[in-house]
Image (spheres, rainbow, N blue to C red):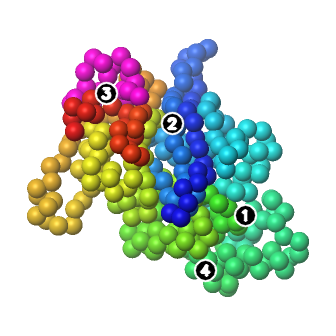
């Protein structure tokens, strides 16, 4: 990275959904519970964790698709608070959704799908200018101009995701939340789409939050990786460091499950199998959320949530026993 300028800063972000539990009672489902991180200009931050840990909710709340329960979101040194802030922010920050089948309107042509953000933000003066921009965006993602008049159902999953990516680029954004953009695609297509994200980042100077549960995909594309568990961030470090030297017991378990192509190394690799099931975010354990599945847990873990602190330069961990287990 040429410069280390912070583009996005998230401070103590919380997103609670209130669930009815009785006639007049409700209980908060803590989807995101006090998450803080920064993303530098031009970098990719990978966000991983098992299903239901709150990764997608982090991305959606950052873009104010969900109203944050509390916490602050800063973009380029300015806090996003008012409706006008959000409207301006949405010209600079967009999203690629997980499911290319349900995120595209079946009644609209490809040209109208990609052109919709241009219409919403009034980013063209003439019809011809709009059409030229749509064709330019299509060429960025490897679609032909004759695809413009077709409908989404006429395309394969990989092509549909390309349409979604072209739509996210329409407003000329600086920041894109990629919400598991390849999980619904075949493995052969995944590689093409990931490489395209890399090329677009280089060409357009983009910054990504890349949400995924496939650790090999995240390793390929990310500069830094954050690991989430049950609404909380448990580890954040440069990508190579988190793979070579994970410090949190949950990160260790997660990485031990990654397939290794070399059979000799794979046999020597000890799989760390976690006991028990992931608790419900409605009834999260007290203190550290991982303690019910952690073999190192003590009474201290039940009493208080460990502080998310910097252990070495750029390597943050939330664990009371990080010094003892590494």
Q: CA distance from mark 1 to mark 4?
A: 18 Å
- Measured from the top left, where is residue 34 in percent x and y? 52, 31
Q: Above or below — where is 279 with respect to 212?
A: above
**Mark 2: which secondary structure?**
strand
Crowding around mark 1 (Cα neighbors within 10 Å: few <14, some 14 to 19, many 20+) is many
Dot 3 alpha-carbon crowd within 10 angstroms: few under 14, some 14 to 19, many 20 or more: many
Residue drawn at x 62%, y 70% is 204
Classify mark 4: residues with Cα within 10 Å, few (<14), some (14-19) or many (20+): some
The residue beneath circle 3 is 320
State the residue position of label 1.
171
Distance from the alpha carbon under mark 1 to that under mark 2: 28 Å
| Residue 35, numbered label | 2
The span shown in magenta is 287-307
* Front: mark 3 or 1: 3
- Which SS type dominates the magenta stretch? loop
Q: CA distance from mark 3 to mark 1?
A: 44 Å
Could you say which is closer to the camera, residue 281 or residue 137? 137
Answer with left or right where residue 122 lies relative to residue 227.
right
Question: Residue 316 at what x, y percent from top left?
Answer: 39, 40
Q: Along the line of sight, which residue is nearer the eye, 312 or 17?
A: 312
Tell me if residue 259 comes above or below residue 141 in the rendering.
above
**Image quarter of residue 313:** top left
First along the sequence among labels 1 and 2: 2
What is the quadrant of residue 144 in the picture? bottom right
Check if residue 306 falls in the magenta segment. Answer: yes
Mark nearest the camera among 4 and 3 is 3
Q: Dot 2: within a 10 Å radius of its alpha carbon, few (fewer than 14), some, or many (20 or more) residues? A: some
Q: Secondary structure at mark 1?
A: loop
Element at label 3: loop
Among numbered discs 3 and 2, the one appearing first in the sequence: 2
Query: Which residue is the site of mark 4?
Result: 143
Q: Residue furthest right?
A: 125
């Amino acid at each position: 990275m040429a410069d280390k300028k912070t583009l996005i800063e998230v401070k103590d972000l919380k997103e609670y959904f209130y669930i009815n539990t009785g006639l007049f009672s409700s209980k908060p489902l803590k989807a995101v519970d006090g998450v803080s991180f920064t993303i530098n200009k031009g970098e990719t931050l990978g966000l991983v964790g098992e299903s239901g840990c709150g990764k997608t909710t982090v991305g959606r709340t950052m873009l104010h698709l969900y109203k944050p329960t509390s916490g602050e979101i800063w973009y380029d040194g300015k806090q996003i608070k008012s409706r006008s802030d959000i409207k301006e922010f949405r010209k600079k920050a967009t999203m690629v959704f997980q499911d290319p089948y349900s995120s595209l309107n079946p009644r609209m042509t490809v040209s109208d799908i990609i052109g919709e953000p241009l219409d919403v933000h009034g980013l063209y003066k003439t019809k011809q200018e709009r059409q030229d921009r749509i064709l330019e965006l299509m060429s960025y993602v490897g679609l032909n101009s004759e695809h413009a008049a077709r409908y989404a159902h006429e395309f394969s999953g990989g092509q549909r995701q390309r349409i979604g990516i072209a739509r996210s680029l329409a407003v000329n954004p600086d920041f894109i939340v990629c919400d598991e953009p390849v999980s619904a695609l075949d493995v052969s297509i995944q590689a093409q789409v990931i490489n395209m994200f890399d090329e677009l980042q280089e060409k357009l100077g983009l910054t990504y939050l890349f949400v995924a549960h496939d650790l090999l995909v995240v390793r390929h594309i990310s500069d830094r990786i954050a690991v989430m568990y049950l609404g909380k961030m448990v580890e954040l470090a440069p990508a190579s460091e988190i793979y070579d030297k994970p410090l949190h017991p949950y990160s260790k378990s997660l990485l031990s499950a990654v397939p290794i192509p070399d059979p000799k190394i794979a046999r020597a690799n000890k799989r760390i199998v976690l006991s028990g099931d992931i608790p419900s975010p409605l009834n999260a354990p007290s203190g550290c959320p991982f303690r019910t599945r952690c073999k190192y847990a003590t009474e201290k873990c039940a009493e208080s949530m460990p502080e998310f602190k910097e252990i070495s330069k750029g390597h943050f961990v939330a664990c009371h026993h990080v010094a003892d287990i590494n």
